Amino acid sequence: MTKTDVKLTFEEYLNYHDGTERRYEFVEGELVEMPPATGKHEAIITLLLVCLFLEIKRKQYPCHARPNGIEFFTGIRTRRPDVSVISEQQKIEIEQTSAILYTPPLLAIEVISPDYRDIDIKDKLAEYQSLGVPEYWTVDWNCSVPNLTVRVLGEEGFYTEQVFTGLDQITSPLFPELALTVQDLLNS
């Protein structure tokens, strides 16, 4: 990730466009460029998005799966998960404005990038936990044992986690009947 020399207020960031296709996160007044993902990273994101969309439709859940265009404001920075699941109310709130949430999404999913492993696993985990994101998933596809970890926020404010590998069917409180395995993700 590369920081730019541009200094903005959060309000200026909401309307900022540099005329390119570059994506940024806002970090304490600075823009941090988000590098393009690998093809495998994007394939996993796409499969997750499609599977969640279909499960939401099948079960008629009052929520919406969205790709990495949605950000949420932590108070000092924005975060742009690879996939977010948002509530009906959050969908309404961003329909006619910047796709920035001021309340945590129901679910944030990050596909771990080898170059940003510590950010995805440590930094974002701590931020999402402190902000009250009810579920946080990480997909670690580029390691010795590819896995998907589902973290669920407990009443004490800390995540408990369950790790899925291979042919394990991925389940979570939000999607208890999801028909998806880690192997499915790896084959995408």
Image (cartoon, rainbow, N blue to C red):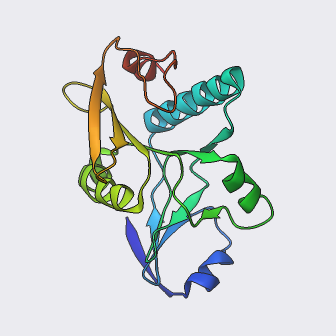
- Give residue 5's position: percent from left, percent from top: 45, 85
On the image, the x and y values in percent for residue 56 come to: 65, 29
Instruction: Write down the quadrant of residue 55 in the picture.
Output: top right
Quadrant of the image occupied by residue 11: bottom right
Q: Nearer the viewer, residue 137 or 6?
A: 137
User: Residue most toward the left?
Assistant: 144
88 relative to 84 in the view: left or right: right
The quarter of the picture where the N terminus appears is bottom left
What residue is at 44 percent from the left and 41 percent from the top? 38
| Residue lying at the far right of the rendered structure | 96
Please tell me which residue is depicted at 71% across the width and 47% down the height of the picture: 88
Task: Tell whether 21 sits left or right of 133.
Answer: right
The image position of residue 124, as x and y in percent, is 34, 56
Total labels drawn? 0
- The residue at 28%/50% (across/down) is 158
Image height of 128 relative to 174, above or below = below
Extreme-front residue of the structure:
155
Q: Position of residue 74 (x, y in %)?
A: 45, 69
Image height of 72 relative to 168, above or below: below
At x 55%, y 62%, the residue is 103
Image side of residue 101 versus residue 25, left or right? right
In the depicted structure, whether residue 158 falls above or below residue 49: below
